[in-house]
C-alpha cells in the first residue's frame, strides 16, 4: 500500500461506508469518510419511511457495535424490523457521533474524480501501484484535492435509478415529464400523500421497492377514494418472481412478496404484464404512457408514475481507475455471475470478501450496494462482511481476509441453471472462495463454490 501516513478514503457514509471506517480503525488504519449529502446516511434518509425486511440482527456491523457499546448505546431488539428512519436514529447517527468516528467524517463533500497521482489510466509509468490516489471533491462550491493510500467506494446506487424506458435508457418524454415521475419509493402515506391521494399511479418494476410502493398505494386507496394503482411488469405475470414466501429466511421479505402477489391476484391493483414502455407524453392533464402490452401497441393514461425498476452504479467519477467489470452486471467478473439474475434467481448469495471484489487497480475496491452493480438482492450484512475482509487485507492479515464470518438468510427462491444432481451449490461456504473456485462454481451455474455434500442447500 502506498504511503501508510495517508488515510484510507471511504466514499459514502451509508451503513457500509461507516462500517468500513470502523473496521479500518479496528485494524489500526486511518479512515477518512467523504459523504456527498449534508448529513450521514443521506440515501437511507431518502427511504426513511420504508420498513426494512431484515431485522436488526442483520443490520448492524460487529466493528461498529464495538465502537458504540462503550458509549452506552443500547442495541435494538434483534428480532424487530426498523424503518430506514429508525436505522438512522438508533444506529447510524450514534455510530457517526462516536468519539472514534466523528472527526473522521466529512459531510457535504462529494467525490467527483479519482485518479492515481501523476498516472492517467493509460499510464503505467514507474511505480503506479505505489502512487497515492488523488481525489477531487466538491465542497461548498469549491473543488479540493485530497490524497489517499487506498480507496473503498461505498457510494451506493440510490442516486442512479434505472429509467422507465423499455431499452434501459430513458423513454422519449421521460425527462420532460419528470415532474410527474418519482423514482424509488416516495412517501405516499407521508410527505407525498397529496400528490397520490385520489389519483391514478402507474408503478413500474418488480422488485422489493416496487412491492413497497404498491402496498403503500393500496393503503392510501383505503383512505382516499379514487386512488387507482396500475402495476407494470417487464415479464408475463406467470414469470414474475414474488419471492420465496414462507420459505424466505427473512420472514418480512417473504411476506412482502406474498402480500404483493395477493394484491395482484385479488384485482386490488391492475397488473400490466408484460408492458414495455416506449414513450411518455401528455394527454390533457394526464400522462400518456405508450408501450407494448403482449406485443400490441397500448397507451395507458395515468396521473403519475413511480419507477422502482432497480438501480445502476455511477461509474462516472472512476474513469481514471482501472476497473474490471462484468459487461452486463457491472460488478467484478468474479462476483457478477453469482448475482446475475440471468443465470439464477438465487438471492441467497454467498458472503465474499476482497478477493472477489478486487480490481486491476491495486488498493481500490467497490463495496456495499454499489459492488452489486445492476444486480438486485444486496443485503447490508453482505456489505459488512465485504468491508471486514477488505480492512483485513489492507492490514496484511490475509488469513482473516479470506475467512468467511457470516451466514446469510436464504431467500427461499433458487433456480440455477446447474446440472441436475448439483444440489449443494447454493449451500453456505465456510471460507472465502479463491478466485478459481468462484469461476468454477460460476461455470456450473452455482452461487457458491463446491461445499461438503452434507451442507444445507437452497437449491433443493
Ligand atoms: C428502500 C430500500 C430498502 C432496503 N431494505 C433493506 C433491508 O431491509 N435489509 C438489507 O440488508 N438491505 C436493504 N436494502 C439494501 C441496502 O442494504 C441498502 O440500500 C443500504 O443502504 C446500502 O448501504 P451502502 O452503504 O452500500 O449504500 P447507501 O446507503 O446508498 O450509502 C451510500 C452513501 O454514499 C453517498 N455518496 C454517493 N455518491 C457519493 C460521492 N460521489 N461522494 C461522496 N458520497 C457519495 C450517498 O449520499 C450515501 O450516503 C434496502 C435498500 C432500499 C433502497
Image: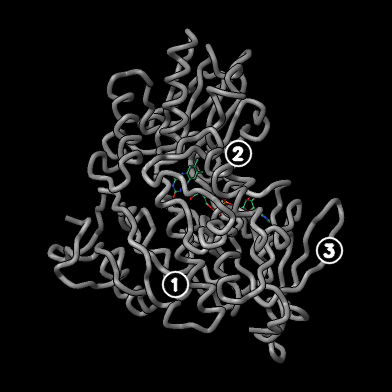
- Asked whether 353 or 99 is in front, the reply is 99
Callout 3 crowding tier (Cα within 10 Å): few <14, some 14–19, many ≥20: some
Q: Secondary structure at mark 1?
A: helix
Horizontal side, residue 33 vs residue 392: left or right? right
Please give the residue where the numbered disc 1 appears in the rendered image. 356
Please give the residue where the numbered disc 2 appears in the rendered image. 46
Q: Looking at the image, tell me whether mark 3 or mark 2 is earlier in sequence order.
A: 2
Please give the residue where the numbered disc 3 appears in the rendered image. 144
Q: Looking at the image, tell me whether mark 3 or mark 1 is earlier in sequence order.
A: 3
x, y percent for residue 272: 38, 27
Residue at x 56% of width, y 56% of height: 68
Residue at x 41% of width, y 77% of height: 402
Quadrant housing residue 7: bottom right
Q: Looking at the image, tell me whether mark 2 or mark 1 is earlier in sequence order.
A: 2
> Spatial distance from mark 3 to mark 1, Cα to Cα?
32 Å
x, y percent for residue 205: 44, 37
Furthest residue in direction top, as rendered: 225
- Asked whether 221 or 80 is in front, the reply is 80
Q: Quadrant of the N terminus?
A: bottom right
Q: Is residue 370 visible?
A: no
Residue at x 46% of width, y 22% of height: 217
**For the residues carrying marks 2 and 1, which lies nearer the camera in this image?**
2
x, y percent for residue 158: 58, 47
Amino acid at each position: 500500500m502506498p504511503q501508510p501516513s495517508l488515510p484510507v478514503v471511504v466514499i459514502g457514509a451509508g451503513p457500509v461506508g461507516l462500517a468500513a471506517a470502523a473496521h479500518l480503525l479496528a485494524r489500526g488504519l486511518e479512515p477518512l469518510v467523504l459523504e456527498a449529502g449534508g448529513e450521514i446516511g443521506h440515501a437511507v434518509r431518502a427511504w426513511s419511511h420504508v420498513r426494512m425486511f431484515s431485522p436488526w440482527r442483520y443490520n448492524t456491523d460487529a466493528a461498529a457495535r464495538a465502537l458504540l457499546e462503550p458509549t452506552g448505546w443500547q442495541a435494538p431488539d434483534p428480532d424487530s424490523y426498523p424503518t430506514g428512519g429508525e436505522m438512522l436514529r438508533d444506529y447510524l447517527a450514534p455510530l457517526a457521533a462516536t468519539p472514534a468516528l466523528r472527526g473522521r467524517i466529512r459531510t457535504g463533500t462529494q467525490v467527483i474524480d479519482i485518479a492515481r497521482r501523476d498516472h492517467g489510466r493509460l499510464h503505467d509509468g514507474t511505480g503506479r501501484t505505489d502512487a497515492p490516489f488523488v481525489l477531487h471533491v466538491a465542497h461548498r462550491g469549491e473543488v479540493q484535492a485530497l490524497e489517499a493510500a487506498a480507496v473503498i467506494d461505498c457510494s451506493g446506487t440510490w442516486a442512479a435509478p434505472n429509467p422507465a424506458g423499455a431499452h434501459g435508457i430513458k423513454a422519449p418524454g421521460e425527462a420532460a415529464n419528470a415532474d410527474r415521475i418519482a423514482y424509488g419509493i416516495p412517501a405516499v402515506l407521508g410527505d407525498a400523500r397529496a400528490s397520490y391521494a385520489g389519483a391514478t399511479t402507474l408503478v413500474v418494476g418488480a422488485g422489493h421497492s416496487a412491492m413497497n410502493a404498491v402496498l403503500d398505494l393500496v393503503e392510501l386507496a383505503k383512505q382516499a377514494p379514487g386512488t387507482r394503482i396500475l402495476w407494470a411488469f417487464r415479464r408475463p405475470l406467470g414469470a414474475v418472481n414474488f419471492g420465496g414466501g414462507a420459505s424466505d429466511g427473512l420472514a418480512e421479505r417473504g411476506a412482502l412478496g406474498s402480500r404483493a402477489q395477493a394484491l395482484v391476484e385479488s384485482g386490488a391493483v391492475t397488473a400490466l404484464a408484460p408492458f414495455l414502455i416506449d414513450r411518455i407524453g401528455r394527454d390533457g392533464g394526464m400522462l400518456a404512457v405508450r408501450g407494448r402490452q403482449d406485443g400490441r401497441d397500448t397507451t395507458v393514461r395515468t396521473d403519475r408514475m413511480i419507477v422502482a425498476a432497480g438501480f445502476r452504479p455511477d461509474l462516472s467519477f472512476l474513469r481514471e481507475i482501472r476497473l474490471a467489470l462484468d459487461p452486463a452486471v457491472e460488478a467484478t467478473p468474479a462476483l457478477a455471475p453469482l448475482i446475475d439474475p440471468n443465470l439464477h434467481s438465487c438471492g441467497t448469495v454467498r458472503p465474499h470478501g476482497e478477493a472477489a471484489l478486487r480490481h486491476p487497480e491495486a488498493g481500490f475496491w467497490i463495496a456495499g450496494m454499489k459492488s452489486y452493480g445492476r444486480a438486485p438482492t444486496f443485503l447490508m450484512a453482505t456489505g459488512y462482511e465485504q468491508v471486514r475482509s477488505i480492512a483485513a487485507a489492507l492490514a496484511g492479515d490475509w488469513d482473516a481476509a479470506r475467512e468467511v464470518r457470516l451466514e446469510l438468510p436464504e431467500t427461499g427462491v433458487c433456480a440455477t441453471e446447474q446440472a441436475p444432481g448439483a444440489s449443494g451449490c447454493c449451500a453456505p461456504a465456510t471460507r472465502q472462495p479463491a478466485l478459481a473456485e468462484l469461476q468454477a462454481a460460476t461455470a456450473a451455474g452455482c452461487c457458491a463454490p463446491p461445499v461438503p455434500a452434507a451442507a444445507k442447500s437452497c437449491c433443493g
